[in-house]
Structure formats: C-alpha cells, structure tokens
Image: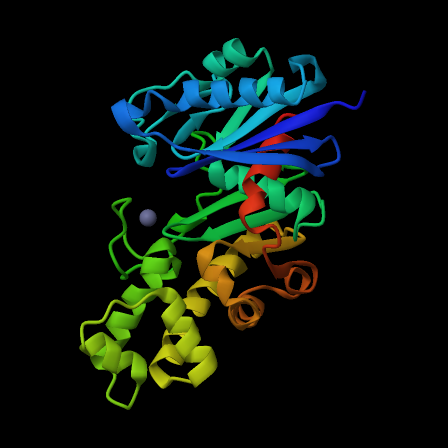
Amino acid sequence: MDKKLLGIDLGGTTVKFAILTETGEIQQKWSIETNILDDGSHIVPDIIDSINHHLSLYDMVPEQFIGIGMGTPGSVDIKAGTVIGAYNLNWTTLQQVKKEIEKGTKIKFSIDNDANVAALGERWKGAGENESDVIFMTLGTGVGGGIVMNGQLLHGAAGCAGEIGHVTVDPTGFECTCGKRGCLETVASATGVVRVARQLAEEYAGGSTLKARLDNGEDITSKDVFELAENDGDDLALMVVDKVTFYLGLACGNLGNTLNPSTIVIGGGVSAAGEFLRSRVEKYFKEFTFPQVRESTKVKLAELGNEAGVIGAASLAK
Ligand SMILES: [Zn+2]
C-alpha cells in the first residue's frame, strides 16, 4: 500500500488538516476550530483527537503514514519539536508539541514555523516548480518568509533565517514591532500599505478618492488602495502602490543578489493584487539586481493560496 503524509496548518482561528500522497496530491482534507482558551492548552489534545477520529472513520492506521508535518505560529525548536511565544494561540510558555502528538497518534512528527512551511509548499507544488533554490515571502497582517536553498529550508543560528519582514528598506522609516525602523513589514504588510497611504496623503494636494476617504476618517484597507490604483487610476493610490512596490523590489533585489534563487514567490493577502503588484515589484527588482541575477531569478505570484500550509507541512514529514 502507498504510504501517506499528513499535513497540519495550525492558525489562530482554524487548524487545517490534509492527507497527501508521497508525491504531494491532496486526497482528503478537513479542519477544526482552534480553541485558544485556557492558555491554548486544548489545541494539541484537539489535534490528536481529530487525527485519531479521522483515521478511525476512514479505516486508516498509523502505519500507513510516513509522518505528520505541521506549520505553526511562534518560535519553533525544530529538533526538540517545541513551540514558544505563539501569542495568537495563547502559547506563552514552552509547548511540547512533538512529544504529545507522537504519543497521542503513534505517528512520527515534524514541525516548523508557518512561513517556512508555506515556503516549502510553494517550492514543492506551487510557483517554485520544485526547483532547489526558492525564496517565499508572504504579505499579510505581517510580512513573513522562508528560504529554501539546495532543497533545504534555511534556519540560521537562532532560527531567524528567512525573516524577510525585518529587512530594512528605509533606515529612517516607521518604527517596527521588532524595535527597529524601516522594516519591510512596516510598509508592505496589509497595515503597512495603509500606513504609507496615510503618510503620502498628508502631503498630497491634488484630487484623489483615496485622499478624500482618508480625510473623511474612513477605514481603508490595502485592498482598497490597490483597487483604487488599478481600477480608477487614482493618483494618490498609484503613488502608494509605487512606493510599496519600490520597497518590495528593493528587498527582493537584495535577496536576489545575495542568494540567487530561481524564483522569489510573493504570496499572502496583499498579493491578491496580482499581476498589477507583481509587474511593479519586478520592475524595481530588475533595477536593483546585477545582470546575471536579473536574468536567472524570477519574481512570481504564489499559486497555492490557503493550501500552501498543509502541503508544505506534509513535505516536512518526508
Ligand atoms: Zn522589524
């Protein structure tokens, strides 16, 4: 019988599960709510119960699985299989995730942080086309990333490799939650785009729907900014998009010059702006890279959407 992989994408609101073939085809998927009450103490037991329930429902046994892989928020010790500091899960103390899940399911377990796992997913079955050198960045409420080199995730000395959100793109820029200034996250996350819009709106004098809506105190999202730029040609919105894509192109360019991946994949909610965003990032990327990198490193949009997490997590188990 063919062996299977089980991928888990643990998030602050849902836990997504998928059973995949060894070649990465999803055969079954399901999800449960994440119960973060009582310091997140129900999360791991709920995951174990859900797996065991699903296996018994479909007459499956632990021996059919090569392993379980999971992506999680927070700081992960991949060797020990522990997680700490996942504040959206209420995990403030050390969680023995690997130990408990292996004991509860009798299946071998591997874990990494969610952005790294999404990078593995896009590299394996998405825009990375299973190439050995791929960088992934996700533009969501924050900016995360993962770097795959020679087919392996980079972790670095303290597990911080791939924290692309904290690459400095403007030394005199906005303060970041990490304590320094001008991080990519402060200008290219969903809230960052709005922050740039507010800053540019202050000095903007011409006619603009975006300016009028900001001045009216309306809640603006990054999606609004990109839509006003793309659909209405709103002057201020176009300036915001230009500035945000400049910063992204600068970060991508420096990553390209340093690591020369075959692909830099852009995903996350902000990347829903699609080709309108990608082509502008690529324009600046080309400006900031030297010829050999410019010709060999592509800038692409993510292709797997929500499934990058479970697919990448499953690949951890291989
Ligand atoms: Zn930062």
Tell me residue 220's x, y (percent).
Answer: 29, 68
Label count reads 0
**Residue appearing at x 48%, y 12% in the figure:** 99
Q: Quadrant of residue 294?
A: bottom right
Q: Quadrant of residue 217?
A: bottom left
The residue lying furthest to the right in this view is 1
Tell me residue 266's x, y (percent).
Answer: 54, 56
Q: How is the image coloured?
A: rainbow
Tell me residue 205's x, y (percent).
Answer: 24, 88
**Residue appearing at x 42%, y 72% in the figure:** 226
Is 58 rendered above or below residue 277? above
- Name the quarter where the N terminus is drawn: top right
- Name the quarter where the C terminus is drawn: top right
- Asked if residue 244 shows in the view, the reply is yes
Is 308 rendered above or below residue 284? above
67 horizontally vs 280: left or right? right
- Asked if residue 170 shows in the view, the reply is no
The residue lying furthest to the bottom in this view is 206
134 horizontally vs 160: left or right? right
Of residues 96 and 224, the one nearer the viewer is 224
**Residue appearing at x 23%, y 75% in the figure:** 214
198 horizontally vs 312: left or right? left
Tell me residue 133's x, y (percent).
Answer: 66, 45
The residue lying furthest to the front in this view is 57
